[in-house]
Amino acid sequence: MSKHRLHWAGWGLLAILLLSGCGGGGGGANQSSASSVDFSSSSVQSSSLSSLDASSSSSSSISSSSSTSSAVALTRLDAYRFLNQATFGATESTAQQLMLLGDSATAYSRWIDQQLVIPARVNSLSYTIAAYPIPEPQGFNMSVLQAARVDQWFQNALNSDDQLRQRVAFALSQILVVSQTGALQHLPFATADYYDLLVRNAFGNYRDLLREMTLHPAMGVYLSMLGNRKASVTANLRPDENYARELMQLFSIGLVQLNIDGTPIIVDELALPTYNQSQIEGFARVFTGWNSDCPSNKPECTFDSTKLQRAPLSGFNQVKPMKLYPDEHETGTKTLLSYPGAKFTTLPAGQTGEKDLDDALDNLFNHPNVGPFIAKQLIQRLVTSNPSTDYVSRVAQTFNNDGTGQRGNLAAVVRAILLDQEARDPSTDRVAIAGKLKEPLLRITQFWRAYDARSASGKVIASANFFGGTFSAPAVALGQGPLQSPSVFNFYSPFYAPPGEIANQNWVAPEMQIATEYLNTTLSNFFWTQSAKRTTANSGLGAEVVYIDTREEIDLAVDASVLVNRVAEKLLGDSAQLPDAVKAQVIAQVNRSAASDAKTRVADAIYLIVSSPDFATQR
């Protein structure tokens, strides 16, 4: 078995080296400087069925300023490509359902229409509360309840019918980052409710999302806005600037001013900064006076006496929006962002904290950077690492105006991203850089969905399926886990380019930053363990161990060619997607085992394809 594992790890590492053009991997994500940033991205949302209808009618066919192709019947490969962008993984059944919705001009839009009206599966908090032991044992470690949230995340990713909403929420969680690592470790209900917030708002308005995120206790704790006091000369205090900085740099406008296509505005060979220290201080003053709401069992409280409740009592404040305590709010003037069209650049003295907050968020939300900054990052998370400037511009324009005059409509933005011609059929001049390396979690969910993975208990307990312990799985094994980023800068930077061919071409490959030799080996070993030891052909599995259904493959195992083609169809959508040279190697490996050894033959076929470059990349 050790020989198998070493061989498999080597194959997986080869896959990453091929993907990187012999460029290296990287460590954790770091803050990018303005000089290395290619900022742009977009997010939008729909706040009512009427705006959904308007968005749908204006984008009922594949959108592109240069698209002149006529509608054609969808192939299964077309369906797989779309569903791998829009869900946690294409399956044969979901591909067939998409193909039945129409041709290339109608099927995708109709599928999106269906997804937009499915009720949101908002269940992370309720599932985490259900895992809380009553009565609470003495010395109980609250951090272990983070595992319940992760379990529910996997269940939603694998089985929920609102796949598009869940996939967009996951993308947003990597832009509007909070993490259980650090200050939120012992606040599992706050992190669970924060993820529910992202799910609820995935098709909403980005301005509404900014406000809800700003006042959520999870964000308040994570970026130290909760308990932020006004300045005090006698106490030598000044407002905390942490949230003000990250709200601008990471959650809305970025570090440099952008054109609508996401490229930096250059003046005298220099990129122009989006904000300065006085504006950081101005926003920091806006965010003073907010603290946790009064505990439900102590409805009378002050700024100094309130604290987040540990136990999930009725109405507990760990999941309630933060409350303004006016005595601790800075009431002086505040400098905001200045840009063409800004309604105001300074807040006057004497406003309430709520008025300051809403005015400041309006000032930020209407900055021209927000559309391209958020648009590009959502494109990167869903479709391709290196979108053309035209693609970014089209999506950013949808962010700015969804066709009904609404700015920030995330449902319209997501539709624009997925229906764009560059997403559906990249032009020949972009084939070389179309798509992206799949992040580890998506490689696993796509594998599991393709093979109808499940456990006897119905749960997906991370610690039973990935090494890393109850608290840290799966992040330790994969370099990534739901709300398990090592910092507010996510698992990787959207601007990361591994040294070598990719960097030399001025391309980026964000996911390559966590494609280190170590993490690639652990992922490769996971795929081998899943393929060989955790299947319907194995007995004695624990109730919480996720296994894949390989009964069909076992029946086909005697014929290596038939077996390999069938596995490729399930994982890639079409056996022709596996290059002939790779297919020959996989068949040869399968034939090294006796025809009677069906389990090993199936394990080899599945493992080698699921760890191949062809499965690891999204085209």
Image (cartoon, rainbow, N blue to C red):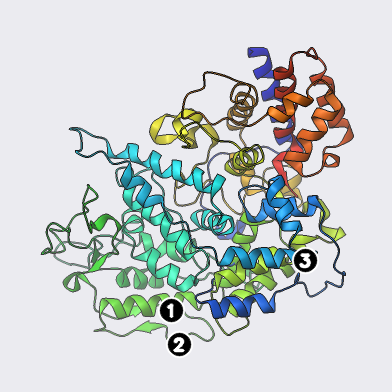
- Alpha carbons under labels 1 and 2: distance apart: 9 Å
Mark 3 or mark 1, which has the lower sequence index? 1
Question: Residue at left 33%, top 68%?
Answer: 284
**Nearest to the observer: residue 245 or residue 312:** 312
| Location of residue 265 with respect to 615 vertically, above or below | below
Q: What's the residue type where badge 1 is placed?
A: Asp
Numbered disc in front, either 3 or 2: 3
Q: Which residue is mark 3?
A: 421
Question: Residue at left 74%, top 39%?
Answer: 570
| Location of residue 152 with respect to 7 vertically, above or below | below
Give left or right: position of 619 versus 85: right
Question: Residue at left 74%, top 52%?
Answer: 96
Near mark 3 (Cα within 10 A), the count class, few <14, some 14-19 or many ≥20, is: many
Give left or right: position of 243 versus 559: left
Q: What's the residue type where badge 3 is placed?
A: Gln
**Quadrant of the frame with the N terminus:** top right
Q: Position of residue 67 (x, y in %)?
A: 83, 71
Numbered mark located on residue 316 in the image: none
Determine which quarter of the picture holds residue 217.
bottom left
- Alpha carbons under labels 3 and 2: distance apart: 36 Å
- Alpha carbons under labels 3 and 1: distance apart: 32 Å
Q: What's the residue type where badge 2 is placed?
A: Lys
Determine which quarter of the picture holds residue 407.
bottom right
